Amino acid sequence: MDQRKPLICVSSDRKTLESDERRWITQLHNVYTDAVSRAGGIPLPTCGVCAEELAQLCDGLILSGGVDLNPVLYGEERLNDTVQVVPERDVFELALFRAFWEQGKPIFGICRGFQLINV
């Protein structure tokens, strides 16, 4: 009997193209997807939409590393220009976290992802 491999949602970064703000690219270090695959799962990178549907479809969530969380999310202010934030990513990943949490599915945070879990 074949057992289905777990489908693991992996959060990714979404950047707008400088040449056309209507277009964006999704970026994800392959170390995350390679690790999921080596562990026997199927990685599914996110694209910034459908948090609820991803939580229903996938067996677990990895919140990947990346730029800083917006300090406003934990009651602080951005102190200087070295703090790089992507508000759209924050909003989407918080929605992802909540959706997976409500489904009782495993969530693993790496660096930024762990900070998001704490928020």
Image (cartoon, helix red, strand yellow):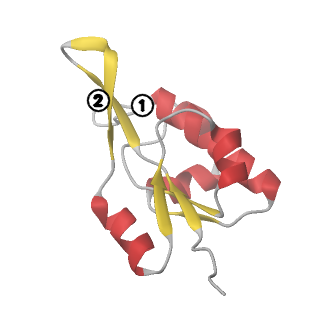
Which quadrant of the structure image shows residue 108?
Answer: bottom right
Q: Residue at x 68, y 67 (%)?
A: 106
Q: Name the kind of residue labelled 1 in the image.
A: Val
* Residue 76 in view, yes or no: no
Mark 1 residue crowding within 10 angstroms, few (<14) / some (14–19) / many (20+): some
Please identify the residue farthest to the left as the structure is shown. 19
Residue 98 in the image, given as x and y percentages of width and height: 72, 46
Mark 2 residue crowding within 10 angstroms, few (<14) / some (14–19) / many (20+): few
Frontmost residue, 64 versus 52: 52
**Label of residue 105 in the image:** none
Q: Which residue is drawn at 32% across and 19% down?
A: 23
Q: Residue at x 59, y 70 (%)?
A: 6
Disc 1 to disc 2, C-alpha distance: 13 Å
Q: Horizontal placement of 91 versus 86: left or right?
A: right
Q: Horizontal placement of 68 versus 93: left or right?
A: left
Residue bearing the label numbered 2: 81
Label 1 secondary element: loop
Q: Residue at x 57, y 50 (%)?
A: 116
Q: Do the residues labelled 1 and 2 touch (CB within 8 Å)?
A: no
Residue 97 in the image, given as x and y percentages of width and height: 66, 49
Residue 31 in the image, given as x and y percentages of width and height: 31, 66
67 is higher (above) or lower (below) than 23: below
The mark lying in front, picked from 1 and 2, is 1
* Residue 12 in view, yes or no: yes
Frontmost residue, 40 versus 63: 40
Frontmost residue, 74 versus 110: 110
Q: Name the kind of residue labelled 2 in the image.
A: Asp
Frontmost residue, 6 versus 115: 6
Residue bearing the label numbered 1: 86
Q: Horizontal placement of 7 versus 89: left or right?
A: right
Residue 38 in the image, given as x and y percentages of width and height: 39, 79
